[in-house]
Amino acid sequence: MKSLQEKKLEIWFLTGSQSLYGPETLEQVAEQSKKVVDTLNAASDVPIKATWKPVLTTPESIKAICLEASANPQCIGVIVWMHTFSPAKMWIAGLSALQVPILHLHTQANEALPWETIDMDFMNLNQAAHGDREHGHLQARLHLPRKIVAGHVSDKKVTSRIAHWMRAAIGWNTAQNLKVARFGDNMRFVAVTDGDKTSAQIALGMSIEAYGVNTLVDCVAAVEPSAVDALIKEYEKIFEIAPEIAPGGPRHESLRYQATLEIALERFLEAGGFGAFTTNFEDLGALKQLPGLAVQRLMSKGYGFGGEGDWKTSALLRIIKSMTEGLAGGTSFMEDYTYHFGPGEPKVLGAHMLEVCPTITNQKPRCEIHPLGIGGKDDPVRLVFSATPASGRVVGLMDLGDRFRLVSNDIEIVKPDKELKSLPVACAVWKPAPNLATSAESWIYAGGSHHTVLSTALDAEVLSDFAQIAQVEHLRISATTTQEDFQREIRWNGAYFKLSSLT
Ligand code: MN
């Protein structure tokens, strides 16, 4: 899987003006907008480069650059700024053709007004205060899904908000190019993991395609023992392997089998250009174990995953991993499993049958073998650990039949009240905001999924920006949520999305 650096993604910075100012002023506009771009690129939290483009003064050049930005695979979004006055009708054709996310930066070359020396030359040059309002009027008229950031570019808050939008644009780019491989269908009779894959591709771009589990069985058979030997050596360095499955142990073959699964799955995904996949314990064919350790390893390498054929959560996991690449914290497939209502503060214990990503822990994971209890296959090898305390969020993506909905809940991962000595799977224990009752009631009112993506790296603003770009509803359950307001938001959003789909 290619890293963000290898992908060389960029944002194009477009500066608007008009020709009536004359070449001298336009040179100044160019110089000053280059400085804005340099300052932005120097901010430590900006994940990808902003590329300066020549100042735009005609409808033809604006349309041309918007078409070019939309067609260039490296360009995943544009930032626009009207340093001077750029009559907005010049932008209609260009913005109507634009196919990438847009951020309207409302800034100014100077931070302070030169109170004592300000003259008409200065006034003619620094017109963003009204130039950007003219431009914003047009973006509003075009109903462009956009982000507006106002402030001087030397302000860390300004660059941080731009950086968050850039990450959302990275997520959108991931979604647009994502291929999800499903091994088998989704779990029989389950509602929320089902959905309309054609609608998902129209709304988010991702292609979701099924493969018979025999395809994977064939890939497993093709793995050579020397590749497994090498992978076992890697496991020995990074995991605490239980003696019974360690090299020389009586059940070592079980560990080798999960290593074989990891290699087979990764080769298949790489060869097909897949960024995410699903499995289903009901449909394992000739596979001897449910992929556990293998899935955990692939998630830690950046792949999306959903259990029980859950392709929406799998895709969402890949999208969120791409949006958080390079940041502290981790991101995993998750399921609200069971509750602690008390004594003490109520908490959720999140886990899954096996598949929790080790990026959410600082512990050295233990590699163990235990019975699964369902599926009727051999005992699967898995990594066992507890998530490291941190603040984060859980996010679900649902198909409501006529549209998609994101629900998120701010959470605080805490240490389990007591050591979980007998729990044979990885887990995370958290306090949901504002409290368990309001969180759970709101989530359930929203029709939120039982599978989620848990992330301790995803900023709330990145998720909101992503939802804005995708034009997908995002319901956030946070410290300020009340159940009454939340229910009202669901009803109002329902009316809004029904009406907006009519246009
Ligand atoms: Mn599940």
Image (spheres, helix red, strand yellow):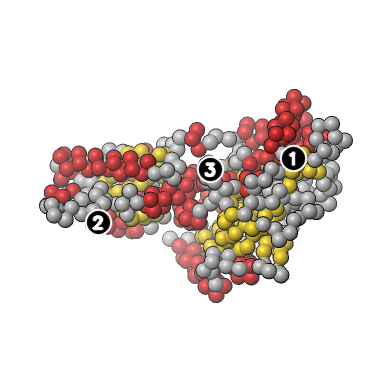
Quarter of image, res 24: top left
Labels 2, 1: front one: 1
Tell me the quadrant of the picture where the N terminus can be found.
top right
Whole-number angstrom distance, CA of label 2 to CA of label 1? 60 Å
Q: Which mark is residue 5?
A: none
Label 3: few (<14), some (14–19) or many (≥20) C-alpha neighbours in 10 Å: many
Label 2: few (<14), some (14–19) or many (≥20) C-alpha neighbours in 10 Å: some
Among all residues in the image, which is located at the extreme right? Answer: 250
Whole-number angstrom distance, CA of label 3 to CA of label 2? 35 Å
Residue type indicated by callout 3: Glu
Mark 3 highlights which residue? 325
Q: Residue at x 16, y 56 (%)?
A: 115
Whole-number angstrom distance, CA of label 3 to CA of label 1? 26 Å
Disc 3 residue: CB within 8 Å of ligand 1: no
Q: Residue at x 55, y 34 (%)?
A: 2
Tell me the quadrant of the picture where the C terminus can be found.
bottom left
**For residue 134, side relative to residue 469 (left or right):** left
Q: Position of residue 189 (x, y in %)?
A: 74, 58
Residue type indicated by callout 1: Glu
Q: Which mark is residue 129?
A: 2
**For residue 411, side relative to residue 296 (left or right):** left
